[in-house]
Amino acid sequence: MTHTTFGDVLLEIDGVGMSFTAADGERLQVLDHIDLNLHDGEIVALLGRSGSGKSTLLRAIAGLLAPTSGQVRYRGKPLNGANPGAALVFQSFALMPWLSVQDNVELGLAARGVAPRERRERALEAIDRIGLDGFESAYPKELSGGMRQRVGFARALVLEPDLLLMDEPFSALEVLTAENLRTELVKLWATKDFPTRCICVVTHNIEEAVQLADRVVVLGANPGHILAEVAVNLPRPRDRHTPSFAALVDHLYGLLTGRDAETSSTRPDLGTPVTTPLPDASVGGMAGLVDLVHHGGDRVDLPEIADDLNFELDDLLPLVDAAAMLGFLTAESGDVLLTEVGARWATADIQESKRLFAAQARHRAPLVRTICSALAGSSDRSARADFVLDLLRRSFSPQDAQRQLDIAIDWGRYGELYDYDTDSGRITADPAAGL
């Protein structure tokens, strides 16, 4: 079939909210009042940053998570369990290592009670369609990452689902392999006998969303909510070097990072370490970005910088978030602008640079502010790092909690606010910081 026009509604997401109970009993809202329809004949990208709940939303569509409020309906009927018309492709491949390629592809059919002969025929057809003919008896350990993901695609497509749901399916692959698989997926989608009617893909990669989708649903974070829906009216195959492609990337980037300039530059973020986690960015990385903006005339187009540096745009976004959190930069549409304090930081000597950074981090970075408050309230101006870590673990995974603490220690050390002793496990205020 062709996919130039969209048909009937296959799935309705009506006022869906999702919340979970944290370890301390507090309710954490992950999704808030999501309204969205998926149609026959379209590819939809769910584009969002960390904390936007895009993977949670995909699992609600798959029927793997029940919404706390609202309803998900497949072909007009409320979901009360796994979606019978959906199949999932995961980022991590999720293959059974003790099963051959063919056995992995047959798994879903076996679970549905399909007879062995029909299972075999359908599995071999799917394997051939996805370009793995000849590897039927191979085991996952014998395959490259790209080939393992092809098995994941075949395992989903063999079910002939109405909805093919993909959760960051290319992000675990190296760049050229990912690009090749994206191109092949678009070619398969254009074939008349493609066995699925709608694709919904979760991604944080703006260019990937524009390359694949007919419609991009942009999600905001904390809690996840729909910021905008953007139609991609570009013919396939799409050339990322055309002005129209670049314009859409710029527009989506602006939606993802757009902030009120006055608010960002003059008022500290009043969030908490949970609602406003520290972006995964080093001080040196931030300083490098601020320096680039300064030498670019205090205003630059970030997609152009990413292209010049041969980096993905998404690799630079944590640096933008961190510099914006600290008031050194603001984001406006597709551009990044230097603030007055950012200009001072870019031109300061090392000691003034540390002083400026400390002042901004102490007031604008929630976790740094929390640590400073704990140190100020202690008689010996010290605190156990495990105390901070335990608080973070109530809302973050153990790995994310540790990463948040590591970033806060890195920022605090640079600003000479506090130091951390790995032997004692204690964070101690710097005497000169006045805590």
Image (cartoon, rainbow, N blue to C red):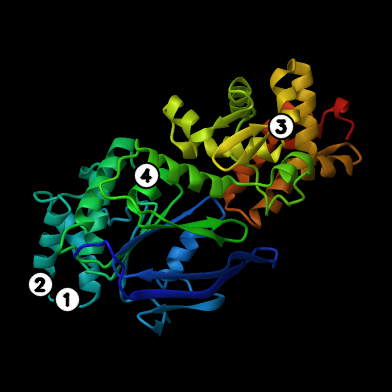
Disc assigned to residue 114: 1
Which residue: 75% across, 22% down? 353
Q: Is residue 53 visible?
A: yes
Marks 2/4: CA–CA distance: 32 Å
In this rendering, the answer to whether 328 lies above or below 367 is above
What type is the residue that disc 2 sits on?
Answer: Glu
Disc assigned to residue 231: none
Q: Is residue 157 left or right of residue 298?
A: left
Q: Earlier in the sequence, mark 3 or mark 1?
A: 1
Marks 4/1: CA–CA distance: 32 Å
Marks 3/2: CA–CA distance: 65 Å
In this rendering, the answer to whether 337 lies above or below 277 is above
- Residue 395 lies, in percent from the top left, at 64, 57
Circle 3 Cα neighbour tier, 10 Å, few/some/many (<14 / 14–19 / ≥20): many
Marks 3/1: CA–CA distance: 63 Å
What type is the residue that disc 3 sits on?
Answer: Thr
Q: Earlier in the sequence, mark 3 or mark 4?
A: 4
Q: Earlier in the sequence, mark 3 or mark 2?
A: 2
Quadrant housing residue 294: top right
In this rendering, the answer to whether 320 lies above or below 238 is above
Circle 2 Cα neighbour tier, 10 Å, few/some/many (<14 / 14–19 / ≥20): few
Question: Mark 3 sits on what residue?
Answer: 339
Question: Mark 2 sits on what residue?
Answer: 118
Circle 4 Cα neighbour tier, 10 Å, few/some/many (<14 / 14–19 / ≥20): some
